[in-house]
Image: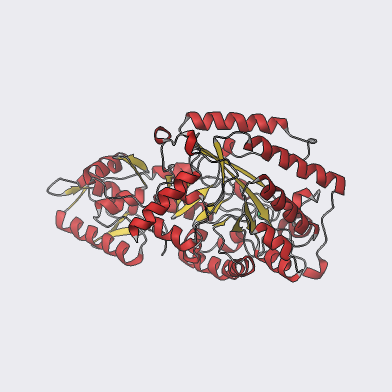
Amino acid sequence: MLCKLVYFLLFELCSLRAASGVYVVLWFDTEDYIEPAADDAALRIASDLTAEGVRATFKVVGEKARVLAARGRTDVISALSKHAIGYHSNWHSVHPSPAEYLVRLGYLEGADEFERREGPGLADVTRIFGTQPTCYGQPGNSWAPQSNLALRRLGVPVYLDEGEHVGIGEQPFWYGGLLYVFRMGKNQFRAQLNVGDEDRAAYKRFDEAVSRLAANGGGLISIYYHPTEFVTTEFWDAVNFAHGANPDRGEWVKPRRRNIEDSERCYGVLRRFVQHMKQNPDVRFVTARELPVLYESPVSGAVNRTAVADHLKRQILFSDVDGQMLSAAEMLLTLLELPPQIVEGPAASGKTTYTKSTIPMPAFHNATQDAAEFIRRFRRLPNEVFVGAETLSLVDFAATLASSAGKEGAVPLVHGTAAFEAFFATEGRRPFNWIIHPEGFDGSALLELGRLQGWTLKPARLRLPARARLGSAGHKPASAYPVVFSQPQLFTIFDLRI
Ligand SMILES: [Zn+2]
């Protein structure tokens, strides 16, 4: 079974591989359930892309899926089903949004609440489209870290969106056990819809991004739209739910429309942009379903404990250790002699109350055993580790453990720093500044929980390095897309299931 799976993975990987190592993920937030013309826009875009031989990812809102079914739009559902289907929350902008209902909840209760509120919409999209969505992305910038745990429980392995909350080097990364395509910086752009019949500046930007990424061994470009943008001149939700407004359904108003000629022009802008991107035979379009296959597994193999200790005592941060990219959490598991696996970060921040400069070896040994037992039991890192009645914060425990490796006698207490925190936004208002959120909405508490989960953060590395490129003979045009992974296959390959 395993051999078959490895063969299958290699085969699919070879058929996906871009000669330049550069990939494009093109995605559409399919969310407007108020203006029926947005249904036609989704149909038109999906059909145009199919005609171009390009597969995209349509992230569908739960209510949008229900409305499509209620309006009898099987044509839209079947056109979108030729592409990858993602999930974009149950209600999108009807309050409370995810950040609104999660900002005062902890990590674990927040994950339960996200599952309670968003799970039914995911089930509806699954039922209506006949496939389990392969990715999620938050409405607007209503991000919250508790969604990671819930999404893994719900069987969604990829987080595909944009936001300022967290990111590494403007490329995909692993976070909370999910493959995140987020904060892509200069690798995220689009052809503007409102600059004429085509946006040649975007072509130039694309060509430059391809050259830059190819020169660095490959990478991903993220491009997104909303089908509703092609038929309206204002957002469907901004005209109804701005700044916390929550009118009853009977009071919802439709957004202003583009005229038919203008919509045609917009479809043309996208079509020409896609045609330009397709011209480069060394670049591949990939969907959210295919993305995890391109990247190395989030779960590392066995690594040398001394090398891990050497790294962790210098800084608490993901790193390449002996050729494997490890998160700080994976390094801690290694030092605790636990098997490689996906764990959550701490649910809350802990404190160091221990005041002496050294810890007797037997007491530290007990603390270490207790920490390992906690992780084995809960598959989560402890907030703090007890030494008798006193505690070490997890960061101080990890730094002390790393420094004690191979030494005898009393263990010197070492204070660590969570260097991974530098990859998160620090200010609580700007990253959550979305017209739908109440004015001045402050997501500081969500960022704080998010930083704690930074233990699990690490860059995602493309599975085949550029030096192992396939020759162009093995390359298929961007239109060749036979690859469809089932969710169980993805979970088996990456051992993400919890
Ligand atoms: Zn959206």
Query: Closer to the camera, 387 or 322?
Result: 322
Query: Closer to the camera, 481 or 104?
Result: 481
Residue 201 visible in the current orientation: yes
Q: Quadrant of ligand 1?
A: bottom right
Residue at x 45% of width, y 58% of height: 490
In which quadrant will I find the N terminus? bottom left
Q: Is residue 328 left or right of residue 251?
A: left
Kindly give the residue lying farthest to the front in the view shown: 473
Q: Is residue 392 left or right of residue 293?
A: left
- Residue 132, quarter of the rendered image: bottom right
Kindly give the residue lying farthest to the left in the view shown: 409
16 shown above or below 76: above
- Residue 365, quarter of the rendered image: bottom left
443 shown above or below 426: below
Residue at x 19% of width, y 46% of height: 405
- Residue 272, quarter of the rendered image: top right
Q: In the image, residue 257 lies at what x, y percent?
A: 84, 52
Q: Is residue 211 left or right of residue 402?
A: right
In which quadrant will I find the C terminus? bottom left
Q: In the image, residue 402 lies at what x, y percent?
A: 25, 46
